[in-house]
Image (spheres, rainbow, N blue to C red):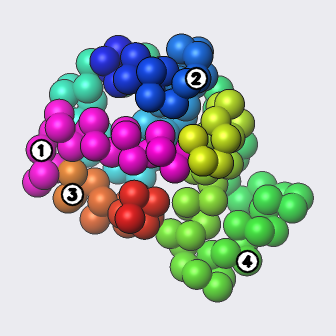
Amino acid sequence: MDEFIQSAVSQLGIDESTAKNATGTALGFIKNGLGDQFSGIAEKLPGAEQLISAAPQAEASGGGGLMGSLKGAASSMLGGGAAEGMELMGALRNSGLSAEQGGSFITMLIDFIKSKVGDGIMGQITDKIPMLKTLVG
C-alpha cells in the first residue's frame, strides 16, 4: 500500500498523513462491504489492515443530524448505493480530502486494487459494493 500512498501524495498534492487516513477509511469501507471476503484481498494489499486500523473511524451509519437525514433521503430516492456513496465521500472529506480530490482518490484506489487483484476479483468487489462502479463511472 506504500506504493499507492506515494502515488496519491504525488498525484493529488496531499500530505502523507491525509493519504494514509483516506486510504484506511476507504479500505475500511470496502472491508465492511465485503465482510470475510476481504481477507483474501488484503493478502494482495500488504499494509491494508494496518491502514484500516490506524484510520479515524467514521461515525456510525444511520447517525442523526443533517447527514443522517440526507443519507436517509438519498437512500429512499436513489437507492442504498447513493447513500453509501455519500457516506464514503463524507468520510473521505473527514480524512482531509476535498470533494474533487475524493472522486480522483477513489478512482486511483480502485485502479490500484484492480492492478493487484485482477479483473475477476475486482468484479466481485463491485458486485458486492455496486456504488463503487458509480463513483468511478
**What is the three-letter code of the residue carrying label 4?**
Ala
The magenta region covers 102-121
Q: Residue furthest right?
A: 65
**What is the three-letter code of the residue carrying label 3?**
Gln
**Is 60 located above or below residue 86 in the figure?**
above
Marking on residue 124: 3
Query: x%, y% of residue 81?
Result: 50, 69
**Is 46 located above or below residue 56 in the figure?**
above
In this view, the mark in front (1 or 2): 2
In this view, the mark in front (4 or 2): 2
**What is the C-alpha distance between the residues marked 3 and 4?**
28 Å
Where is mark 1, residue-wise?
118
Mark 4 crowdedness (10 Å alpha carbons): few <14, some 14-19, many ≥20 = some
**What is the three-letter code of the residue carrying label 2?**
Ile
Earlier in the chain: of badge 1 and badge 4, it is 4
Front-lying residue, 67 or 17 = 17
Q: Residue at x 86, y 61 (%)?
A: 66
Mark 1 crowdedness (10 Å alpha carbons): few <14, some 14-19, many ≥20 = few
Judging from the image, what secondary structure is the residue with disc 3 in? Answer: helix
